[in-house]
Amino acid sequence: MIPLSWYLIFSAALFCIGLFGALARKNAVAILMGIELMLNAVNVNLIAFWHYHAQVRSGPYVHGLAFTTIVFVVAAAEVAVGLALIISAYRRRQTAVVDELTLLKG
Amino acid sequence: MNGLQFVFLLAALVSLFSAVMVVSARRMMHAALWLVLTLMGVAVIFVTLQSSFFAVVQILVYVGAIAILIIFSVMLTRRVMEDHGDQILPGWRGAVLVAVLLFGVLVGFLTLWQGFSVMLVELPPDTDNVLELGKALVSPQEFVLPFELASVLLVAALIGAITIAVDRRKEHQR
Amino acid sequence: MAVETLIVLIPLLPLLAFFAIVLFAHRKNSLSHWLALGGAGMSWVLSMVVFWQAIQIEDLSQHPFAVAIQWLPTGSTGLNIGLQIDPLSAVTLFFVAWTVLMIFIYSVGYHNFGQPRGDHDRPGLPPHGATITDQHGHTHRVPSIEPMYARFFALISLFAFAMFLLVVTDNLLTLYIGWEIMGLCSYLLIGFWYGKESARNAMIKAFLTTRVGDVFMLLGLAALYSLTGTLNYQSILNNPTVLNGLAQAASPLGGVSWAGLIGVLLIIGTIGKSAQFPLHIWLPDAMEGPTPVSAMIHAATMVSAGVYLVIRFFPLLSVGWDGHQLTLPVLVMGAVGAFTALFAATIALAQNDIKRVLAYSTISQLGYMIAALGVGAYVAAAFHLITHAFFKALLFLGSGSVIHGMEHGVLHTGENIDPQNMLYMGGLRRKMPITFWTFLAGGLALSGFPLVTAGFWSKDEILAGAYASGQMLIFWTLALAALLTAFYTMRQITLTFLGNPRSQSAEHAHESRPAMTYPLVVLSFFAIAAGWVGIPDYFPLIGGIVPNWFEEFVGSMLLFHAEETHHSLLPLFTSLVVALGGLSLGWLTYRAVRQPLDPLEKPLGGLYTLLKNKYYVDEFYQLVFIRPARWLAETVTDRWLDRTVIDGILHSIARLGIWLGNVLRKWFDLPVVNGAGDLTATGTRNFGAFLRSLQTGRVQVYATIGLGAAAMVAILIYFLWVVG
């Protein structure tokens, strides 16, 4: 009953908000939160398209779902490793502000 | 507007609002909590898409594990900053611009697609998505490979996280 | 060997001696003088052989010994260089060879060969004596050897080459070459003792004064060549067509023919070289050189070259003359010669330096010869040239011997007098007998003592020629000059040799060594006997006994002889009177001189001062020519033109260059070139800094930029491909 475009626009908006958060936040954990938002938006997009495809086929169609599963797994793994990194970095330099972690500065 | 659309709109608005709060909250703990709310909103949207399995998975994994992890790490990295100064970088206007631009590009390209305004209808109830998903995930012709790789990835992440986060100071003191 | 080959060797042998001495023997005194004597001696032998052969030929003037090569082939004609012995050059060769050899031998003694080296002698200054100790422990001062002994012999050998070349050559160009080389040697030998400032001034004066004459001579030479295409004597002088052609052609100078103009130009060369007025000023100063130089160059040979030139070119100078109407060159010669003869004789009266008297005497006698040509007495001029060479060389060498004797006395006594001043001499006939008798022979020859001296015969010929030509003014001028000549000659002999010594040095003088006295004896023989080959036929009593060989031999050179008028005895009588009268007057005036003071000085007063100062001609030239020339050189050319104008221009150019350099540096090099370089550097650095500022190290910034770029690209693609 709901047009696909709503889901797509919603997912796009959520993605962009997450992107903003990832690009413009100081705290590393906040950046991670932004990334989580982005991943969630991707998931919504995927499920929406699964539904779109499933409703035009006759048999079962689980490609979208499988993809989403993998995204979940990857997101979880990534959060774990990322937070471990942040905490390790925090221990080293006593800060979690990415602005101060500028060893790549040229 | 039928009830489903209303529910979707409500959930969408809540999610988007929470998402905005996540990225603009001053205090990290608030942001984490707003994140929880956003995740829950997304779970509701999953439900409207007749993917109840993933709604539950969302709650279990994201809210139950990831959000909690984030809260833990917020609490662990609390000391340094928090509560004073902007949490926003000086270059945030560029980021806004890029985000808006990207949004525009995405939506613009999407509108070009002729399937953009297709109406999503209810799926036939006899399809057992979860069973099919399970069968597909372990079926050699289908998605067993990504499935196995994902599990390997989890193991790697696990080991990696432990390796990274282990307290080296204790090692040196030995 | 053919006689032509011998002729070629005559100038070459002294030249070889010159090179040999300069290159190899210049440190060995005895080798140097043997080389020089060898060269001069061989040339003398060859000259005698050639002369002997020449006098046996009947018409030598028409068919001279000749050899020539083509030097400058210019189309059909060309410049030929060669040698020629005709009567005139044969007799000239004779006297040149004898005098050169005698002077070479004399020089060995004059420069004190064999004596020890002097105490303070340095090259460039005359030797001042050496101190020796004999076996008793007494120290004596003796004459010392000349420090530049070998150089002297080298230079006189070169000079001998030039003179022989001039005599044996057959064309005017080679004559001019010999002329100029002699001028060079004269310069070098006058300034032989270059350490003395007076010598340095004299050498420059001699060279420049003769140069003035030489420039005009060169113009005449160039004109002659351009008009006739040749400089060969035979082609010009023995060729009536050429001579007449030159006489007809009108020169740019109004009213004068080319022959006249060329003649006058050549005569100006002679005026310079033979020291006639107004270019006589160099000869007295040339006495700064050693006496052999004065004898050879300034008495016997070089100054004779001037007279030789005009005698040789007499056909050109006198072309068109028929005994009555004088041509311009002949007129000039008569006037200049006669005037100079008298002028110089008057100056000689008041000179006290023994060599100066002889110098003015030479000028005077050369004037005689030129005046002889001026009245057409061709043979007489040649005759006097030859006899004068012998007795003047004799007189100079004799004076050198006297000076050596006086210098010995000065060294012995330490007296502070000029050994050349006659007022301090006296009584030397007892101390230096050979010198006395030979000097007397030469002096009597100069005065024209009758019969037994050569000078009598030649001078008498000139007076006869002057009288016969009808030029009475010239005749009486020459007669008066002869009187004065005899007077001052006797003055010289009396003051030097007769009477008693007037100074300590004269007391202690002694005779010179044989190397110096033997040449005197030989030359005195010629001074006495040389005249007897030219006894004129009309001479009372003895004329006609001995044929006038000289007249026939040399007279054959002329194509046209002037008519012979009747021979009067007046000239003969006049010459006897002036000679004997002058001699007696001189002896009477000076025989009683006891103090070093000239008895004529007070009576003549201002006139005497005028004569002593040579009529102030040198001072006049200094004022009129030298000072303006120096002013022109120093002030105008050096200070103004050179330093102010030219250097100013150069400095301005330099300053301009520097200014331009500074401007370019300041306005172009620094801003543009350096600026470009610096701009590149700073620009790159700034750009790098800018780029570096992008490398914040903050991943979020990188991501922002990356995504922004991706969005841009997407929009671009949209507009390019999707819409377009």
Image (cartoon, rainbow, N blue to C red):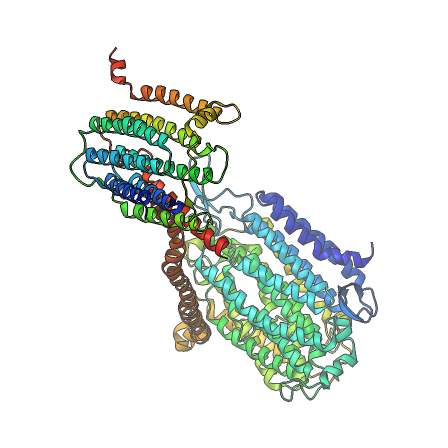
**Residue found at the far left of this picture:** B84
* Relative side of C3 to C124, left or right: right
Residue C486: horizontal and vertical position, in percent? Answer: 55, 72
Viewer-closest of B154 and B14: B14
* Quadrant of res B85: top left
The mark tally for this picture is 0
Q: Is residue B169 above or below residue C206?
A: above
Residue A47: horizontal and vertical position, in percent? Answer: 40, 36
Q: Residue at x 18, y 33 (%)?
A: B81
Residue A42: horizontal and vertical position, in percent? Answer: 38, 37
Q: Residue at x 68, y 49 (%)?
A: C38
Q: Residue at x 39, y 77 (%)?
A: C606
Q: Is residue C722 visible?
A: yes
Residue C175: horizontal and vertical position, in percent? Answer: 68, 66
Viewer-closest of C376 and B2: B2
Q: Is residue C391 visible?
A: no
Viewer-closest of B16 and C575: B16
Viewer-closest of C509 and B155: B155
* Quadrant of res C15: bottom right
Q: Is residue C83 above or below residue B89?
A: below
* Quadrant of res A16: top left
| Image quarter in which the N terminus of chain C is found | bottom right
